[in-house]
Image (cartoon, rainbow, N blue to C red):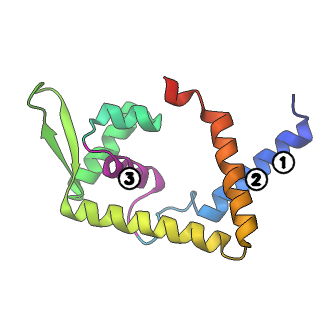
Amino acid sequence: MLSPKEINEIRSFNRKYTDTLGLLNKQVFNTELSFPESRVLLEIGQNTILTPMEVAKKLDMDASYTSRIVNKLVKLKLLIKKTSKEDARSKSLILTKSGQELFDQIDSDSNRQIKQLIVHLSATEQKKLYQSLTTAYDILFKNESEN
């Protein structure tokens, strides 16, 4: 088991990385969306068809909170809810043209942010960082893909 000092070092990294990415900022990049709102938009943009419940499950978010976010994104004309042909009670979430443009902007800004974070590293350090992060991801989340 890790020592309290080691656990604190992991927590310190988490706080620093959260600050560096601006996850506690009121808005994501230069948009009017909060971090949870942008995550919902990105999740929908990365998948072909999702229901609000699938979004909540994928992001491990409360269903009612997800529903409020989805309704806000619909009101902002970034999403549309389309009734399923198989089940009239089910709604699929689809990005509008404006939603797709905002998705593309946030995705591009996110990539640029990571590139700026690592630009000062040598190619060897970048590869080492990448390998470390993929190793950490595999160790922490390897069972999630099996569920």
| Contact flag, marks 2 and 1 (Cβ < 8 Å) | yes
61 w.r.t. 105: above or below = above
Q: Which of the labelled discs sits on residue 9, or is there none? A: 1
Q: Which of the labelled discs sits on residue 137, or is there none? A: none
- Tell me the residue at 65%/64% (across/down): 20
Number of marks in picture: 3
Q: Nearer the viewer, residue 135 or 1?
A: 135
Q: In terms of secondary structure, what is the magenta stretch mainly? A: helix
Classed neighbour count for the residue bearing mark 1: other residues with Cα under 10 Å, few (<14), some (14–19), many (≥20): few
Amino acid type indicated by mark 1? Glu
From mark 3 to mark 1, how far is it between C-alphas? 30 Å
Label 3: element kind: helix
Instruction: Locate residue 93: give its quadrant.
Output: top left
Classed neighbour count for the residue bearing mark 2: other residues with Cα under 10 Å, few (<14), some (14–19), many (≥20): few
Instruction: Locate residue 34: give its quadrant.
Output: bottom left
Residue at image mark 3: 42
Magenta segment: does it hold 39?
Answer: yes
Q: Position of residue 109 (x, y in %)?
A: 46, 69
- Tell me the residue at 37%/32% (across/down): 63
Label 2: element kind: helix
Question: Position of 71 compared to 107: left or right?
Answer: left
What segment is highlighted magenta in the picture? 31-48
Q: Position of residue 2 (x, y in %)?
A: 87, 33
- Tell me the residue at 41%/55% (across/down): 38
From mark 2 to mark 1, how far is it between C-alphas? 6 Å
